[in-house]
Amino acid sequence: MENNAELNYVIPAKYRRMENMHIIFWLVKDISWCLIWKVLGIAMIFPTLIISLIIAWRTRHIKSELAHNLAITFWIIANSLWMITEFFHVDTKIFFGILTGKHLSLIPFILGMCVLLYYYIIQKPREDRETQVATL
């Protein structure tokens, strides 16, 4: 008998509320950046980042979710670093060779990309192979 049941990823309501608050904090942070509200923008880094880490921790048992949530966490770090360099007018200051303050945000951006590359190039093919072998 063929099993056509789809796997569903179900998010408990309390987790969904936290994810929704995360989006609100992130938007407030970015709106503050746009309007150059330094104190509020910097203050919003903390709840945005903390909730991102909590979400990644809660999804750690699902490798695809963990990879994407870690990439989001690195994105928030990069985005926050970029915002801070602009707020304090060091975004165009040369730090290393030709790298400016804004370019320092490339480090967490690239780390997030590395997490996703690892997942899609190494982890996901393994998961697909294990699923194929298990269904034979």
Image (cartoon, grey):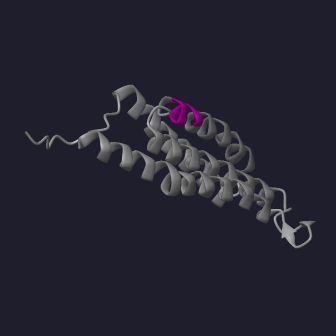
Q: Is residue 16 left or right of residue 119?
A: left
* Percent x, y of residue 109: 66, 57
Look at 52% across and 45% down and name the residue there.
67
Q: Residue at x 57, y 50 (%)?
A: 71
Vertical position of residue 64 compared to residue 113: above or below: above
Tell me, yes or no, if residue 122 can be seen here: yes
Instruction: Say whether residue 4 is magenta.
Output: no
Q: Percent from the top left, x then y, of residue 118?
A: 56, 53
Quadrant of the drawing holding the N terminus:
top left
Q: Can you say which quadrant of the picture contains the C terminus? A: top left
Is residue 35 at all visible to an observer of this figure?
no
> Residue 29, how many percent across, how many down?
62, 48
The single residue placed furthest to the bottom in the displayed view is 98
- Spot occupied by residue 72 in the image (x, y as percentages of width and height): 56, 49
Report the residue at 54% width, 54% height from top. 116
In the image, 121 versus 24, the foreground residue is: 121
Q: Is residue 32 left or right of residue 135?
A: right
Q: What secondary structure is the magenta-colored segment mainly?
A: helix
Position of 132 with respect to 27 (left or right) is left
- Numbered marks: total: 0
Front-most of 14 and 27?
Answer: 14
At a point 56% along the width and 57% down the height, the residue shown is: 117
Magenta residues, as a range? 53-57
Closer to the camera, 103 or 82? 103
Which of the 4 image quarters holds residue 110?
Answer: bottom right
Of 106 and 39, the residue lying toward us = 106
